[in-house]
């Protein structure tokens, strides 16, 4: 072959490679541009929240804190140069409404991901739709075990400790502190209450009595009367704030004196005392649990950082446990978005959460893994004394199976500068 011919063929091959390279780059650019909710300037995510309805007291403040944290992150340049846009839609804690608003977020608003959708009955109603749309469904605001089904719902993840983990830990304390006592259970008539009861009975065996409530009926007097008649000495309550206040108020009105041990989701003292007003004295002695820094601990560096953010972006709302929840969950999401890389896709985001390794304000590690979509692994107990809710005793971890309840002794993490995670 003559040299001239070789040079021509080589040039042609180079042009072909250049064209192929350009085509691949164009394909990659096109793929990036086709990711729902992601542009060069922003990433759009959405949520359903009870801004009205029976779960609004307290819970309506969570999304305000989450949005405030994202405003703070955006002021620092966002994540990989993109600002986070958080679309919050009210579902009134009504599953039928939840379906409507989530469809709008996904199909009309084309959000990149769902974050912190609140409620066991509400979010359960959209799981199949979310699955078919392959939308990252992160950090559902509920401790139901429904979110930990990676084979069935591969894009859905919990965030807080599940109710069975919590129930086991609460029941372990009751078993130790009240040996031989009549222990009873009061719970929401859905997976919230059932999962909690399952954890309690893993430790205690069958409870002495159990009663449930529905969120559409505030008449809890008969249920509380039945627990009183059964001679309950300890009541473990899986209730949202409004129904914790109703139940404990009814118990006081009926002269029913028992030790109340309340799920973290319905035990925020600031929220309950606002609902009970002058009757908040009935909260004295209430035992509960949590897995985040206690809002009243002003020496905690996470509380200090979140309070600064709150004062700048969310000052119209109280700094309570719901706000700390919103800030903490938002912090975890930013970690996940960072881990998804500078060209995020829905698949990369899901893979980043499965890989796990996140740490933050929580007292225990997350459980995320390839085959585990559950969130925090444990809690610490708190008690209301003298109008203040404070921690006591060690932090405990377990799982929703037969693992024992054990003490967790690793020291807590400290926040990075401005409480903004870095890659």
Image (cartoon, rainbow, N blue to C red):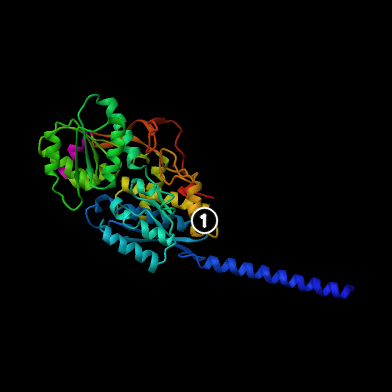
Q: Position of residue 171 (x, y in %)?
A: 29, 32
Residue denoted by label 1: 348
**Would residue 319 be seen by someone viewing this image from the given angle?**
no
* 173 and 319: which is toward the camera: 173
Density class for disc 1 (Cα within 10 Å; few <14, some 14-19, many ≥20) is some
Judge from the rendering whether residue 387 lies leftward or rightward of residue 151; answer left or right: left
Magenta residues? 277-285
Residue at image coords 17%, 42%: 247
Q: Position of residue 90 (x, y in %)?
A: 29, 60
Of helix, strand and loop, which one carries label 1? Answer: helix
Q: How many marks?
A: 1
Name, please, the residue furthest toward the top.
Answer: 179
Judge from the rendering whether residue 336 lies leftward or rightward of residue 97; answer left or right: right
Assign the N terminus to one quadrant of the image.
Answer: bottom right
Judge from the rendering whether residue 134 lies leftward or rightward of residue 201; answer left or right: right
Name, please, the residue furthest toward the front.
Answer: 152
Q: Is residue 179 above or below residue 363?
A: above
């Amino acid at each position: 072959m003559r040299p001239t011919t070789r040079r021509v063929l080589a040039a042609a091959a180079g042009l072909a490679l250049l064209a192929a390279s350009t085509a691949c780059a164009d394909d990659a650019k096109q793929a990036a541009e086709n990711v729902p909710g992601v542009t060069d300037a922003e990433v759009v995510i959405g949520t359903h929240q009870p801004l009205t309805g029976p779960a609004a007291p307290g819970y309506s403040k969570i999304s305000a804190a989450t949005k405030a944290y994202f405003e703070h992150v955006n002021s620092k340049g966002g994540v990989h140069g993109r600002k986070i846009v958080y679309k919050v839609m009210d579902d009134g804690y009504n599953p039928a409404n939840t379906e409507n608003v989530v469809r709008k977020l996904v199909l009309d608003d084309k959000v990149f991901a769902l974050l912190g959708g609140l409620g066991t009955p509400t979010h359960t109603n959209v799981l199949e739709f979310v699955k078919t749309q392959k939308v990252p469904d992160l950090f559902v605001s509920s401790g139901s075990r429904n979110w930990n089904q990676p084979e069935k719902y591969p894009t859905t993840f919990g965030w807080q400790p599940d109710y069975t983990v919590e129930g086991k830990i609460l029941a372990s304390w009751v078993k130790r502190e009240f040996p031989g006592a009549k222990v009873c259970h009061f719970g929401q008539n859905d997976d919230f209450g059932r999962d909690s009861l399952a954890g309690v009975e893993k430790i205690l065996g069958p409870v002495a009595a159990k009663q449930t409530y529905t969120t559409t009926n505030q008449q809890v007097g008969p249920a509380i009367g039945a627990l009183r008649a059964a001679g309950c000495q300890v009541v473990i309550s899986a209730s949202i704030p409004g129904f914790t206040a109703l139940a404990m108020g009814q118990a006081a009105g009926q002269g029913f004196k028992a030790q109340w041990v309340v799920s973290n989701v319905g035990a925020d003292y600031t929220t309950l005392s606002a609902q009970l007003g002058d009757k908040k004295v009935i909260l004295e002695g209430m035992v509960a649990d949590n897995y985040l820094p206690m809002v009243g601990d002003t020496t905690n560096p996470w509380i200090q950082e979140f309070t600064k953010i709150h004062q700048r972006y969310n000052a119209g709302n109280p700094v309570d446990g719901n706000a700390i929840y919103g800030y903490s969950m938002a912090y975890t999401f930013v970690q996940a978005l960072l881990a998804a890389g500078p060209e995020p896709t829905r698949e990369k985001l899901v893979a980043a959460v499965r890989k796990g390794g996140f740490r933050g304000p929580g007292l225990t590690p997350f459980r995320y893994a390839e085959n585990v979509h559950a969130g925090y692994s444990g809690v610490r107990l708190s008690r209301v004394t003298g109008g203040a809710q404070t921690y006591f005793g060690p932090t405990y971890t377990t799982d929703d199976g037969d693992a024992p309840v054990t003490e967790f002794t690793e020291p807590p993490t400290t926040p990075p500068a401005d409480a903004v995670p870095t890659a």
